[in-house]
Image: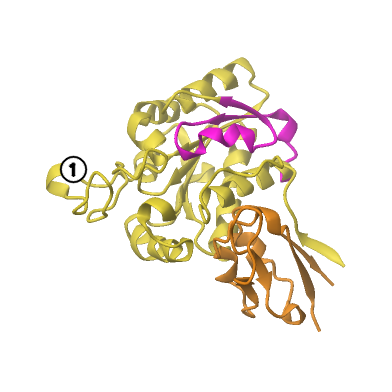
Amino acid sequence: MAKGIVIFNEDICKGCALCTTNCPVNIVVLDTSRINQKGYHPATLSDPDKCIGCANCAMMCPDNVITVERF
Amino acid sequence: MAVVFQKTKGLTDKQTHYCPGCTHGIIHRLVAEVLEELDVLGETVGVAPVGCSVLAYEYFNCDMQEAAHGRAPAVATGIKRALPDKVVFSYQGDGDLASIGTAEIVHVAHRAEKITTIFVNNAIYGMTGGQMAPTTLIGQKTTTSPYGRDSNITGFPLRISEMLATIDGAVFVERVSVHNPAAIRKAKKAIKKAFEVQLEGKGFGIVEVLSTCPTNWGMTPVNALGWLEENMIPYYPLGNFKSPEEAK
């Protein structure tokens, strides 16, 4: 059961992958099957159910793509 | 359901022009969050430098002023003296502050101006195309040191925080980094402290933030953070060099 929800503002993501480096449950990934309007692979969650809502991904994001909510 | 992280009101909605993975974005956010938390966004005047962050005035949601290259501390001095009730900060890179603006930063500290400086050190000139900066590490390859910086020709990297800490007028000097979430939390604490020192009218405060330049270092953003941790932190040790308690 997920403890948090991560919302990505995908259109402004630059695909830098900094958010993917510090996830304690390793679920933040770049979605290589899609590109956003900027032309980058946007960040997304591979398994949203595992999210613990720690906000490490949002902390690392240089472009304010990520909003995190916790139950 | 509680929101644990959302974009601060201290930043505008404009998307930054920074390269993917550039830590300027993180540092902008930290400054903006601190201004929002201290509830001084409406009373703040920021001074933008020349360099990659030349357009910072488009991103901070407070009054901003652009300065000539290296002169942000001088412009900030003028603003603070004319409007002493305002919170004034300068946001500068290492090409701006540690090279062409060395005189300005030293003398703003020597005059104990009650302003705050955010010094972003990424050991290279970013905007102009990756030339060697005074802060470039020995052996680091740049477009103007293609075989690596050679101390016989170009001397040694400049440690600005240590230098400024020797000046009595500088009451808060700290070096922080943004290479992982723990470091980012510490960086935010230091930036907040620097602004509090200004609000208390104690003197000049500077926070040096170690930053990356993935584009000009020729690395992925993730590798650049690793390079920062392995190479920059040993030469530029993190920590507080001066706080108001010591300055007394």
Closest to the observer, B146 or A60: B146
- The N terminus of chain A: image quadrant: bottom right
Whether residue B57 appears in magenta in the rendering, the answer is: yes
Q: Determine the residue located farthest toward the right in the rendered image.
A: B1
The hue of chain A in the figure is orange
Please state the horizontal and vertical placement of residue A47, each as a whole percent of the image: 71, 80
Tell me where the magenta segment starts and ends, as one range: B37-65
Q: How is colour applied across the structure in the image?
A: by chain
**Chain letter for the yellow part:** B
- Determine whether, in the image, residue B22 is placed left or right of residue A8: left
Q: Amino acid at mark 1?
A: Thr
Q: Determine the residue located farthest toward the top in the rendered image.
A: B82
Instruction: Name the image quarter holding residue B101.
Output: top left
Whether residue A58 appears in magenta in the rendering, the answer is: no
Q: Mark yes or no: residue B192 visible.
A: no
**Residue at 28 percent of width and 52 percent of height:** B137
Closest to the observer, A20 or B72: A20
Judging by the rendered image, the residue that carries numbered circle 1 is B154
Please state the horizontal and vertical placement of residue B228, each as a whole percent of the image: 40, 60
Instruction: Name the image quarter holding residue A23.
Output: bottom right
Q: Mark yes or no: residue B136 visible.
A: yes
**Residue at 60 percent of width and 59 percent of height:** B185
Picture layout, residue A39 above or below residue B15: below
- Determine whether, in the image, residue A68 is placed left or right of residue A42: right
**Residue at 63 percent of width and 40 percent of height:** B196
Please state the horizontal and vertical placement of residue B33, each as a whole percent of the image: 68, 47
